[in-house]
Amino acid sequence: MARDIKLIALDLDGTLLTTDKRLSARNLDALRRASESGIDIVPATGRIFRGLPQAVLDWPFLKYAILSNGAAVYDVAHDSLLCRAEIPLNQALAIMAWLDGQPVIYDCYMDGQGYMNEAMWRQIDRYAWSPIVVDYMKSIRTPVPELKSFIQDQSRDIQKIQAFCRDDETQRRLLAGMPFPDIALSSSVPRNVEINHADATKGHALLGLAAHLGLEREQVMAFGDGLNDITMIRAAGVGVAMANAVEEVRHAADIITATNDEDGVAAVIEGLL
């Protein structure tokens, strides 16, 4: 394994966090030790910043975050974005209008905030797969009377659109393609479809952050489990897939570690240190 690692990027759900969304003591200790050795520790997630778990927000070594699947790279200390790649407003409106004809509910992230049609917000418990997820989704999404009208009034571009399906077949069909150019389709959790600008990938954002820090890709390690992690697994000098990762991620990785419930992140970092 490469030893000159200076940046470690970590997906959260299904990777760093356990199935019940906890950060284990062993994983936290490994991250702390890595930081003390001079390695930058960066969450790389589909979440917005305010949606990060408190256990992550409390890291004394939290300097940067890759958010909304790479739509934003956030400099925590300076409260600023190092880069952004967003869906233009008119295209976002067209995508939402198209999704209105699909058997899904959907939301969007805009300027680091989550928004959703109130009628869809009230149906979250029919689409989410656990009470924990229902509570999390409701907590970071502000219900509005009509989402398209709301974002049009705001006149802002969109960081990410998420569609939530009731069945696997609908998810597979949507991931197979949508009639819009310059978009990236991915998924991070069961039966969701995440829609970003084509340049908003975790891999693109990770390489941008590495360049900002003056690092070569060989000095970067990335951990992931979901379809939205493939680009950063491939971009990193050392890509690590969790044992619970989807098949495509395992095939793209240089290393396969233990599952997220078995402290797979810590196992690799301990070996690195």
Image (cartoon, rainbow, N blue to C red):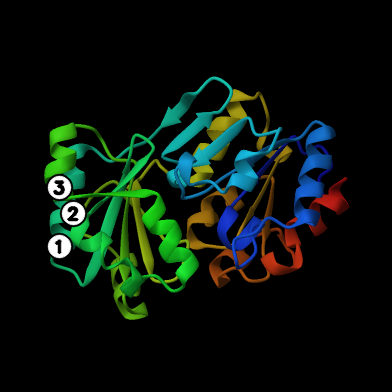
* Residue at 66% from the left image edge and 56% from the top image edge: 16
Q: Which mark is residue 96?
A: 2
* Residue at 48% from the left image edge and 56% from the top image edge: 228
- Return the disc, 1 or 3, that comes first in the chain's sequence: 1
State left or right for residue 230 relative to residue 94.
Answer: right
| Image-quadrant location for residue 106 | bottom left
Q: What residue type is labelled 1?
A: Asp
Q: Which mark is residue 100?
A: 1
State left or right for residue 18 relative to residue 150.
Answer: right
Tell me whether the residue at label 2 lies in contact with that at label 3, contact meaning CB atoms closer than 8 angstroms: yes
Picture quarter with the C terminus: top right
Tell me whether the residue at label 1 lies in contact with that at label 2, contact meaning CB atoms closer than 8 angstroms: yes
User: Of residues 233 and 257, which is closer to you in this image?
Assistant: 257
User: Of residues 41 and 211, which is closer to you in this image?
Assistant: 41
Badge 3: residue crowd in 10 Å (few <14, some 14–19, many ≥20): many
Badge 1: residue crowd in 10 Å (few <14, some 14–19, many ≥20): few
Q: Is mark 3 on a helix, strand or loop?
A: helix
Q: Can residue 81 be seen in this view?
A: yes
In space, the residues marked 1 and 3 are separated at their CA atoms by 11 Å
In space, the residues marked 1 and 2 are separated at their CA atoms by 6 Å
Q: Mark 3 points at which residue?
A: 148
Q: What residue type is labelled 3?
A: Lys
